[in-house]
Amino acid sequence: MKTRRLTMAQALIAFLKQQYVERDRRELPFFAGVWGIFGHGNVAGVGQALQQQPDLRYYLARNEQAMVHTATAFAKMSNRLRAFACTSSIGPGATNMITGAATATINRLPVLLLPGDIFARRNVAPVLQQLESEHSQDISVNDAFKPVSRYWDRINRPDQLPFALVEAMRVLTSPAETGAVTLALPQDVQAEAWDYPEPLFEKRVWPISRPLADRALLERAVSWIRAAKQPLIIAGGGVIYSEAHEALARLASQTGIPVGETQAGKGSLSYDHPQNLEAIGVTGTPGANLIAREADLVIAVGTRLGDFTTASKVGFQNTAVRFINLNVAGIDAYKHAALPLLADARVTLEELSAALTGYRVSDEYAARVARFKQEWETEVERLFNLRHGPPLSQSEVIGIVNGSSDPKDVVVCAAGSLPGDLHKLWRTRDVKGYHLEYGNSCMGYEIAGGMGVKMADPSREVYVMVGDGSYLMMSSEITTSIQEGCKLNIIVHDNHGFSSIGGLSQSVGSGGFGTDFRYRHSDTGQLDGEPLPVDFAANAASLGAHTIRATSREDLQRALAEARRQERTTVIVVEVDKEMRVPGYESWWDVPIAEVSEIEAVQRARAQYEKAVKKERHFL
Ligand SMILES: Cc1ncc(C[n+]2csc(CCOP(=O)(O)OP(=O)(O)O)c2C)c(N)n1
Ligand SMILES: [Mg+2]
């Protein structure tokens, strides 16, 4: 067999360049490039290989966690058909990627992580940044990637590489298994040469199939739907990744079955589709949640059925409720003791449509759905036009940003009070118009993620909505967005602290303790002094962004128009009223409250909690 003499790192990069995916006869190169931050653990290995093979583009990030978020957002925006690799040094560069890995894996999004690792040869150990262990020399900080990776391997000899690479690709391109894949690369092995067999570097096309559901189970699912009086569809992220949105829209129109959308599934239907009750669960609309409460059949499509969707299992109170889970992943298909349709969402929704001809929900049920929809429109209009402040209410800011954006534009968010408010209020008009990382709800994802979205589709304006807390945690990638000419519209919601957790703290009887950004008070010794003087606009300007401050509705409208005209990343800082929150509707979230406490408010909250928790159901 012909061979090519390369270092392990050179072989790795040469392989990545040749990986393609194919779905529905459309072929795409899988890797769009490699993000990285070099240190001694990768500069002479993977760094040298990237320099020598510039056709796989290298992107320099500011923070390793951030670069994994960028890669993850890119994969999400690409419906998992494209991805990035991320290279780090050993030690802190590597462990900085762990939060990103968890975020990717929890959200079922592909990213290839290439942390440098300690010497395989061991004679110079302990090396800089090496974690030592008394009981084994076969341990490094990279072992901490194991629980957050869907595939994990360490390449201790250059000849191990080919076998790890094909496994990595199998997992990355599998809709059911995908997530973070980690190949830990010892620093010395990266630079070692081996005669790699030539076929390793040939073009490889990984098929992304659309598996069909078991025929008997599909028939049973059809009979369950035909027998249902109050069916409900829950649309999760899988609908979007499978490009099943049109099939879903047809099925909903044809049958009249209402649809509730999860955070990852929002956008499956346009907000004004007649059957779309929009957000469901803890941050859901009244219509979706009341229909869910009484539903006798829940058809869960491409969703993990997380607690925000199930309202911590209090969301479905009909004693006769049954579940049909249409999902490509077994772990999801079998949840809630469902009838499992272990299959691709798109083909199966099409098959269900065909098998359900003649079936329609009752006129009464359809009228109820229509009424809920209309009432919700009115409520959103009210929240978009509170005329509160300044400081403005967050709902008005969302309304103004939503109103200023084009249907194809994308809103990006991840943590704080914004995700819930956006889930309820954002009027999504395009299947890729709503990008929420809410599997890990990771503060710091927003700006880094926004860049991944923009890279996946530069034709759309990207609106990153980010709380001041998240901004302070990770705004470094503004610099990277300037470097890459990757224009973002970033709206910083300055409410001087954590509105979300502050509100939660109040609801658990703790009065917002420790959630404001304030000076330590010399009298009380607590963090209850004056607000801290953080100048977000000055901060963003120092990173290279165009910045605008907005106070009123008119300011914000003008600022958004100006941002749209800008060619570089623009940061709009708007003060929002921390206490002017969007209410919850017909839902509940299980956050356990202290069983004993000296504080009366906590005791009261506990008493309420004990009542509420009794409604949690076991779907076994
Ligand atoms: C990395 C990380 N740390 C902590 C949390 C817990 N957490 C959730 S929301 C939040 C506060 C977010 O503050 P901010 O971005 O200002 O948004 P706001 O709540 O004010 O809307 C915190 C600390 C988290 N989700 N992610
Ligand atoms: Mg805040």
Image: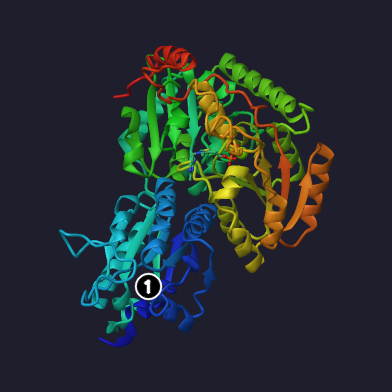
Camera-nearest residue between 228 and 569: 569
Give how far across and how far down residue 331 sits, in percent. Answer: 32, 40
Q: Position of residue 77 (x, y in %)?
A: 55, 53
Q: Circle 1 sits in a helix, a strand or a loop, which is it? A: loop
Q: Is residue 262 above or below residue 204?
A: above
Residue positioned 59% across, 61% down in the render:
455
Asked whether, in this view, residue 407 is left or right of residue 95, the answer is right
Q: Is residue 137 above or below residue 520?
A: below
Residue at x 36%, y 77% (from the top left corner) = 9
How far across and how far down the image is residue 90, in percent?
Answer: 36, 67
Residue flagged by tag 1: what amino acid is it? Gly
- Residue situated in front as seen by the camera: 185 or 138: 138
Q: Residues within 10 Å of mark 1 (few under 14, many from 20)?
A: many
Query: In which quadrant is the C terminus drawn?
Result: top left
Who's the residue at 28% across and 67% down the image? 164
Q: Nearer the viewer, residue 515 or 248?
A: 515
Kindly identify which residue carries mark 1.
41
Residue at 59% over, 28% down: 275
Above-or-below relation of 42 to 268: below
Residue 465 lies in quadrant: top right
Does the beta carbon at disc 1 come under 8 Å from ligand 1? Answer: no
Relative height, residue 447 to residue 251 (above, below): below
Regarding residue 308, the answer to whether it shows in the image is: yes
Would residue 214 be seen by someone viewing this image from the given angle?
A: no
In this view, the residue farthest toward the front is 523
Residue 196 locus on image (x, y percent): 29, 82
Image quarter for ligand 2 equals top right
